[in-house]
Image (spheres, rainbow, N blue to C red):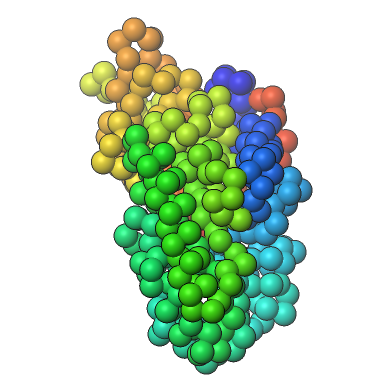
């Protein structure tokens, strides 16, 4: 499907899902999880959409991962009853009240990485199931793997139920390091699991995985993976080699609004693409049907494209398909996703968890 196959009457900019590609991506990751003998608990912060979560569940996902209590509330309201909040949430009285109500509708597991957060959680909701977060090299949150057992013991004494360990190998979002990060993630989870056992706690959940590392995850390395971006793909994953352009399921339909000074200027600025640009990225986004073009300048409502000399540039008013650098940010900027099959608009899915930050 090229841009010309999508209805030209769609207002731009808007985010479009190729539903056939989306379904293929969902099925492929589910099949991979089955091959390596691990549960699949995809991260719903990427799509924030109950419709897409339903596709994942239908393909065999055992539950969902979310980042916030409010995301969990949205998906619980949509009928998803197995949720992991993979974040060191500080549970004060208000969040305790909300979590108590949430637990009446769904099984909820929380992430912790400190004794303080475990005690705060236990004070509000004793007996809550938790996973200890360990740092596998991303150096964001999580304890060192050798310290996981000590924290797990402290957490258990405070009154929560420690079920295992988890990590996020976010440092895999760099070129050429995926296999190295996969091995580091596996070693981290093995070390953390052994640390829990030394403290008398058997880890029943050993959870890891990300879109860049999922393909390299070996059987037995963990019993749960939590990729998110795989459902759509984005320009980062394209440049990392994690996805092929033919697999990218979400694009921003944009119009050429100016050719001033020889530039190709689109109406897809940072207010729909998001502003993320990794240091190694070749631009602020890619054009799906023009892989040699690059967005070299991005402001709120303008995307300025460097157009390859060997290809005639589009005229003013023409539509192009832009691949955002970081699809999770782009999705959170819109109210709905336009669903297309074979070039025809077949549905519109609300981004139900948009802005669910608390």
> Can residue 271 be seen in this snapshot?
no
> Which residue does the image show at 44% across and 62% down from the upper left?
191
Q: Is residue 154 depicted above or below 14 in this figure?
A: below
The quarter of the rendered structure image containing the N terminus is: top right
Q: Residue furthest left?
A: 261
Q: Quadrant of residue 41?
A: bottom right
Q: Residue furthest top?
A: 310
> How far from the left and from the top, in percent, is residue 292?
36, 19
Q: Quadrant of residue 48?
A: bottom right
> How far from the left and from the top, in percent, is residue 54?
72, 51
Q: Is residue 138 depicted above or below 161 in this figure?
A: above
> How far from the left and from the top, in percent, is residue 116?
40, 85
Left or right: residue 116 compared with residue 224? left
> Can residue 116 be seen in this snapshot?
yes
For the image, the number of numbered tags is 0
> Which residue does the image show at 42% across and 79% down from the upper left?
150
> Which residue does the image show at 55% across and 24% down from the upper left?
246
> How far from the left and from the top, in percent, is residue 103?
68, 78
Q: Residue furthest front?
A: 198
Left or right: residue 179 compared with residue 214? left
Q: Residue furthest bottom?
A: 123
> Which residue does the image show at 57% across and 20% down from the upper left?
2
């Amino acid at each position: 499907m090229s841009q010309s196959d999508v209805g030209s009457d769609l207002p731009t900019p808007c985010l479009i899902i190729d539903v056939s590609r989306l379904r293929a991506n969902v099925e492929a990751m589910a099949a991979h999880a089955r091959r390596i003998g691990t549960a699949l608990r995809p991260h719903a912060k990427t799509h924030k959409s109950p419709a897409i979560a339903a596709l994942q569940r239908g393909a065999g996902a055992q539950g969902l991962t979310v980042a916030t209590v409010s995301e969990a509330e949205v998906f619980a309201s949509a009928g998803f009853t197995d949720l992991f909040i993979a974040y060191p949430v500080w549970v004060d009285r208000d969040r305790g009240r909300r979590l108590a109500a949430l637990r009446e509708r769904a099984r909820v597991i929380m992430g912790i990485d400190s004794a303080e957060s475990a005690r705060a959680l236990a004070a509000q909701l004793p007996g809550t199931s938790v996973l200890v977060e360990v740092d596998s090299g991303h150096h964001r949150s999580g304890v060192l793997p050798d310290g996981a057992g000590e924290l797990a013991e402290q957490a258990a004494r405070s009154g929560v139920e420690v079920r295992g360990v988890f990590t996020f190998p976010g440092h895999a979002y760099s070129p050429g390091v995926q296999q190295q990060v996969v091995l580091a993630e596996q070693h981290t989870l093995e070390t953390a699991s052994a640390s829990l056992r030394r403290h008398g706690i058997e880890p029943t959940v050993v959870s890891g995985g990300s879109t860049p590392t999922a393909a390299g995850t070996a059987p037995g390395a963990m019993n749960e993976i939590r990729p998110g971006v795989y459902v759509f793909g984005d320009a980062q994953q394209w440049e990392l080699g994690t996805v092929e352009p033919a697999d990218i399921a979400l694009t921003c339909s944009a119009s050429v609004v100016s050719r001033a000074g020889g530039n190709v200027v689109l109406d897809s600025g940072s207010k729909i693409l998001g502003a993320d640009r990794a240091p190694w990225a070749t631009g602020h986004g890619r054009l799906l049907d023009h892989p040699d073009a690059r967005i070299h300048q991005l402001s709120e409502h303008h995307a300025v494209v460097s157009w390859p000399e060997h290809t005639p540039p589009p005229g003013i008013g023409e539509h192009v398909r832009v691949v955002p650098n970081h699809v999770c940010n782009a999705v959170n900027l819109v109210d709905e996703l336009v669903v297309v099959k074979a070039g025809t608009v077949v549905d519109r899915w609300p981004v139900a968890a948009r802005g669910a930050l608390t």
